Image: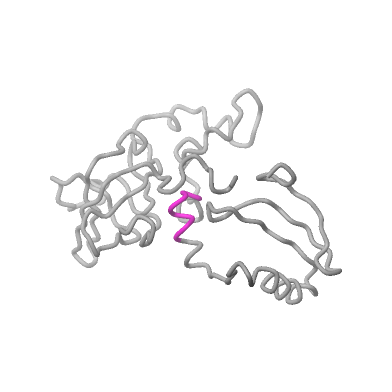
Amino acid sequence: NKAFPFMAVGECNMNNIPARRFRISFSGELAYEVNVPAASGEPAWLELLEAGKERGVTPYGTEPRGTMRIEKVHVAGSELDGRPTALDLGLDGMANREKHFIGKQLSQRPAMLAEGRLQVVGLKSLEPGRNLRIGAHLVDDKVKLDSVSQSQGHVSATTYSPSLKCGIALGLLKDGASRHGEQIDAVFPLDDETLRVEVCHPVFIDPKGELVRA
């Protein structure tokens, strides 16, 4: 960690393959990204697999990474639809209000700070064996969804979490940051489905970020 800490960047050589390495993570786990020239892609891949064989290294695809990004609330396209601000996404800590940055003036307008804004939340299925549906409307339990105007938000990304052993999701909910612990319904009218869910903090796993710095 001292020699190459989280967010470090450096150049290296992999058996005569020039490479650039980054201590970054798209999964919330301890991870590195390695850049090599295009012509060296396959040799570098095979070199990494061979080097990690004794430790049981194995490739994994986009689906497991998608699960981990939801567990860690790495917001992506389904949350970044152009309407939420950094504050809505829980990323306001990354914006230095003492300096200028793109979007600063817009973020200070009254409508961007008003009550009722859609804010990112975590959602847990309260019904064993049932997962949430992407696009489901989030409504109070006593409300029958007869109109989109009754919707208080929507589910943006879903998965089954092997770590938590239940269906989880990210969603955008009105005043969501202040509603952790509430129980509401996720309604999917196309299939006449209703699922009871708990609103929670969007970081499901490792809230202190200890894994990426391990």
The residues colored magenta run 67-74
Horizontal side of 70 relative to 173 (left or right) equals right
In the figure, 62 relative to 141: above or below? below
In the figure, 60 relative to 148: above or below? below
Q: At x 38% / y 61%, what residue is drawn? A: 162
Work out which residue is located at the far front of the displayed protein and give it. 54
Q: Quadrant of the N terminus?
A: top right
Work out which residue is located at the far right of the displayed protein and give it. 16
Classify residue 194 by image quadrant.
bottom left
Horizontal side of 3 relative to 165 (left or right) equals right
Q: Position of residue 127 (x, y in %)?
A: 21, 58
47 or 142: nearer the eye? 47
Horizontal side of 66 relative to 188 (left or right) equals right
199 or 20: nearer the eye? 20
Q: Position of residue 177 (x, y in %)?
A: 37, 36
Residue 137 is inside the magenta segment: no
Classify residue 156 by image quadrant.
bottom left
Predominant SS along the magenta part: helix
In the figure, 45 relative to 196: above or below? below
Tell me which colouring the rendered structure shows: one colour
**Count of number-bearing discs:** 0
Q: Position of residue 47 (x, y in %)?
A: 73, 72
Horizontal side of 4 relative to 29 (left or right) equals right
Q: At x 78% / y 71%, what residue is drawn? A: 38
In the figure, 51 relative to 128: above or below? below
Q: At x 21% / y 51%, what residue is drawn? A: 185
Q: Position of residue 147 (x, y in %)?
A: 21, 51
Classify residue 12 by image quadrant.
bottom right
Q: At x 71% / y 53%, what residue is drawn? A: 22
